[in-house]
Amino acid sequence: MFRGISNGRVTVDVDKKLPQGTYYYVLEYTDASNQTHSEAGWLYIKR
């Protein structure tokens, strides 16, 4: 579950809440059948 808290990357300190806004993501993964998948989307955080 996404809780809107930073994992301590470059722009937001660890355990600080991310600012309100739209965030985009791209997930690339390989499943158990060795097939590659790519999923993209967005989410909006409203504080």
Image: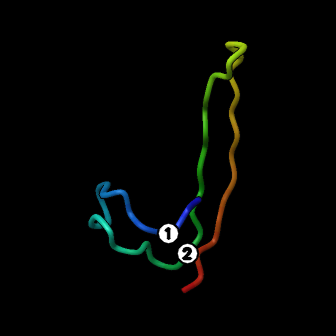
In percent of width and height, residue 47 lies at 54, 86
Find residue 41 and report its horizontal and vertical position in percent.
69, 53
In this view, 21 is above or below 39:
below
Mark 1 vs mark 2, foreground winner is 1
Q: With 8 as the anchor, is 43 left or right in this view? A: right
18 sits left or right of 33 in the view: left
Q: What kind of residue is marked 1? A: Gly
Of residue 34 and residue 43, the one placed in the foreground of this image is: 34
Residue at (27, 67) in percent of width and height = 13
Considering every residue shown, the one lying at the far bottom of the view is 47
Q: Residues within 10 Å of mark 1 (few under 14, many from 20)?
A: some
> Height in image: 33 above or below 3?
above
The one nearer the camera, 26 or 29, is: 29
| Residue pictured at 45% horizontal, 77% vertical | 19
Secondary structure beneath dot 1 equals: loop
> Gap in Å between the C-alphas at discs 1 and 2?
11 Å
Q: Quadrant of residue 23?
A: bottom right
Residue 2 image point, x, y percent: 56, 61
Mark closest to the chain's N terminus, 1 or 2: 1
* Residue 44 sits in quarter: bottom right
Q: What kind of residue is marked 2?
A: Gly
Q: Residues within 10 Å of mark 2 (few under 14, many from 20)?
A: few
Rendered residue at 49%/69% (across/down): 4
Say which mark, if any, is on residue 18. none
Q: Secondary structure at mark 2?
A: strand
In which quadrant of the rendered image does the N terminus lie?
Answer: bottom right
Which residue in the protein does label 1 denote? 4
What percent of the width, then of the height, locates residue 17? Answer: 40, 75
Q: Which mark is residue 21?
A: 2
